[in-house]
Image: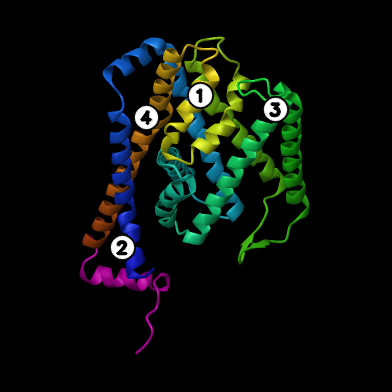
Amino acid sequence: MSKVQRVLTAALPLLLLCVAAYVLHRELSHFRREDVSAGLAAVTSTRILLALAVTVVNYAALTLYDVLALGHAGHRIPYPRVALTSFVGYAFGHNLGALFLSGGSVRYRLYSAQGLTALEVARVSVFNALTFWLGLAAVTGTSLLVEGGGGVLSLSPTVAHAVGAALGLLLVGYFVACATVRKPLRIRGLEWTLPTPARALAQLGGSCGDWGLAAVVLWVLLPPGSVSLPSLTALARLAGIARQVPAGLGVFETVMLSALTPRVPAPQVVGVLLVYRCVYSLVPFTVAALLLAGNEVLEKRRHLSFDVGMPGCSRAISSCCFADSLPLKRAT
């Protein structure tokens, strides 16, 4: 990398952490003591703990996105490193918005230390985005076909069934393409190989599990019997749009209030959404920011101890041993 690229790469974690601190401050500044008290009073501690447990499972399931993407790209990275990168990437992406850019920046910082180039990390991010939209299409299509638009979002049965069938055909077309097209596709000068049918099926299963678990987190916080899980899962398609802005600020709350207030009193919905945002967004985001900071400290200490522990002759020997892994300078 050039000197400018090295400086930007080193400054990237600091920039991300500063943005994370700003978002946390902005989020917490909107919370008044009365709002927190009302939200906690509307939800029992048992349901909060259950929502936290489902959130942990959800973020663990999200690591399958990166596992599948790296397997498709032919890279083998230890799962703990993949899990760390995936968790931090999605926690930042869900809160900072622009998932491809914010989550992709985290992935570039952490995966580049494992030898991946910027182009390879971009391919991983594109594969993850494709997996994300496959699950969204499957959840939306199934909901429209089963409920006929009569869930939390009112659509005429004809329109709902037509859209659901179109999304189903789109998924079928994707699987047919994965089974029959083996030559790399060229898109704007870049080559892209479709996954195998088995990996495409794993994409669909992992993404549907992600969408379902995200809906379950909110479902367990709502009053029992207020709304069915399939109806709530249908809102995932709007949550996908809301993810494009930082933490879905305003958009997510507006959608949920308009959809749930006919079934649940508005003050109670506000309290539940407050707890949901803390459980599903702020807690993982805070943990991810701490993990990223800890990783950076460990990396700096490891590099420092490596340099300090290799003075004089031993450093020269090491330079010879690793010579073929270093770029050669042009002879003058």
Evaluate if marks 4 and 2 touch, with contact meaning CB atoms under 8 Å apart. no
Marks 4 and 1 sit apart, C-alpha to C-alpha, by: 21 Å
For disc 2, the marked residue is: 7
Marks 2 and 3 sit apart, C-alpha to C-alpha, by: 49 Å
Marks 1 and 3 sit apart, C-alpha to C-alpha, by: 18 Å
* Disc 1 secondary structure class: helix
Q: Is residue 154 above or below residue 127?
A: above
Q: Which mark is residue 283?
A: 4
37 with respect to 49 (left or right): left
- Name which of mark 4 and mark 1 comes first in the sequence: 1
- Name which of mark 4 and mark 3 comes first in the sequence: 3
**Residue at coordinates 28% horizontally, 35% vertically from top-left?**
25
Task: Using the rendered image of the protein, determine whether residue 217 is visible from the camera's viewpoint.
Answer: no
The residue lying toward the viewer, choosing from 34 and 49, is 34
* Disc 3 secondary structure class: helix
User: For mark 1, does the 10 Å Cα neighbourhood hold few (<14), some (14 to 19), or many (20 or more) residues?
Assistant: some
Q: Position of residue 167 (x, y in %)?
A: 71, 38
Q: Position of residue 145 (x, y in %)?
A: 73, 27
Task: Using the rendered image of the protein, determine whether residue 84 is visible from the camera's viewpoint.
Answer: yes
For disc 3, the marked residue is: 144
User: For mark 2, does the 10 Å Cα neighbourhood hold few (<14), some (14 to 19), or many (20 or more) residues?
Assistant: few
**Residue at coordinates 35% horizontally, 59% vertically from top-left?**
9
